[in-house]
Amino acid sequence: MTDSNRHQQVAVDAPLVLLEFPSDGVARITLNRPEKRNAMSRRARRELIAALDRCRGAARAIVLTGAGPAFCAGVDLKEVDAAGPAQNALDGDDPWIAVQEAIRRHPAIVITAVNGFALGGGVTLINSSDLALASAEAEIGMPEIGFGLYPGLAGPSTQLRLSPKRAAWMVLTGRRISGRTAQEWGLVNLAVGPAELQDEALALAVDIAQRDPVTLEWCKKALWEVPMHITDWTAALEYGESVGTQIRSRTGAVGDGLSAFAQGRRNPGQGANGGRHG
C-alpha cells in the first residue's frame, strides 16, 4: 500500500463522532467532520446514536459539540441530493428524527456547546438538547427557504422554542443570528466568548453530574412533558406532584437533601450564590 493510499484509508476509517469521558459522570461527544462543517451523513448519524447509547449508565451530563469552525451544518446535502426527488426535506428523514429522539429520551442531561456554524439540522440539535451554550460569534440559521423548502425538523422545533415572530424570522428569511442574539431570544441559555465555551460547557456538565441520576432523569422528563404535552394548569400541577412521587420512590436523594437542610448544611441552589449562574 502506498503512503497516499494509506492516508486515504485512515481518512475513510476516521470516526465521525468522538466520545470521551473527561470527568466522573460526564461525557463529551464531538461531531468530527470538520472539513464538511460536521454535516451529518448517514454514517455520522449512526455513530452519534451509538455514542449516546454508550453514555447510558455512564454519564449524567453530556456535552455535545463540534470539531473545527462549525458545530453542525445540518444533514449532508450531497446524500440528500443522491436520494432523489422522493426526499421531501433537507433534514426530515427518519434517521435524523431518530437522533433527536435519542437525545430527547436519553436519561442524561444533554448540553450543546455551539462552537460555530449551526445551520438547519444544527439548529435542530440545539432545540433537542436540554441546555445550550454558544460562542457569542456563532452563526445560527435555517437556509432551507433558499432551497424552496420548509425546514422539516429545525422549523417546528424552533417554533416550539421561540416566540412566533422570532421563529418566523428564522424560517422565512434564512438569515443567521449570532450566538449573542440566540441568547437574547432564548434559543440558547448562555453566549460566551469563543475561547471560554468548552470550559464553560464542561463546568456546567460537571456541576449537573453531581446531582442524583434518578432526579435528573425525571426532571428532564417533566421539562419535556410540560408544556409540550400538558398545557392545562391543574393537570400540570398534578403531573408535577406525580413526578415528585416517582423520584422519592426510586432514590433516597430527597431524604438526604432534607436531612442536610435540617442539619444546617446548604444544598446546591440554596444560599448566597445559589440562584446565579457564572
Image (cartoon, rainbow, N blue to C red):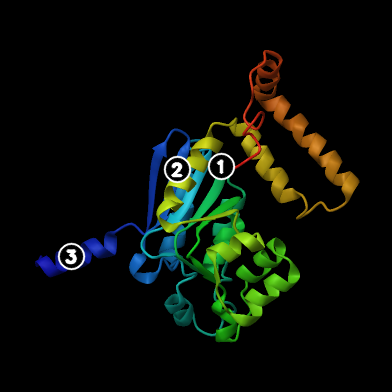
**Rendered position, 220 above or below 160:** above
Out of 79 and 205, give the one closest to the viewer: 205
Question: Residue 127: image x %, image y %?
Answer: 61, 59
Residue of label 2: 27
Question: Residue 217: image x %, image y %?
Answer: 63, 39
Q: Spatial distance from mark 3 to mark 2, Cα to Cα?
A: 29 Å
Question: Residue 23: image x %, image y %?
Answer: 42, 36
Residue of label 3: 7
Residue of label 1: 108
Q: Secondary structure at mark 2?
A: strand
Q: Residue sitting at 59 percent across and 50 percent down? A: 131
The answer to which of marks 1 and 3 sits earlier in the sequence is 3
Kind of residue sitting beneath label 1? Ala
Say which quadrant the C terminus sits in: top right
Marks 3 and 2 in Cβ contact (< 8 Å): no
Instruction: Say whether residue 208 is left or right of residue 267.
Output: left
Q: As drawn, which residue projects farthest toward the front?
A: 272
Q: Spatial distance from mark 1 to mark 3, Cα to Cα?
A: 37 Å
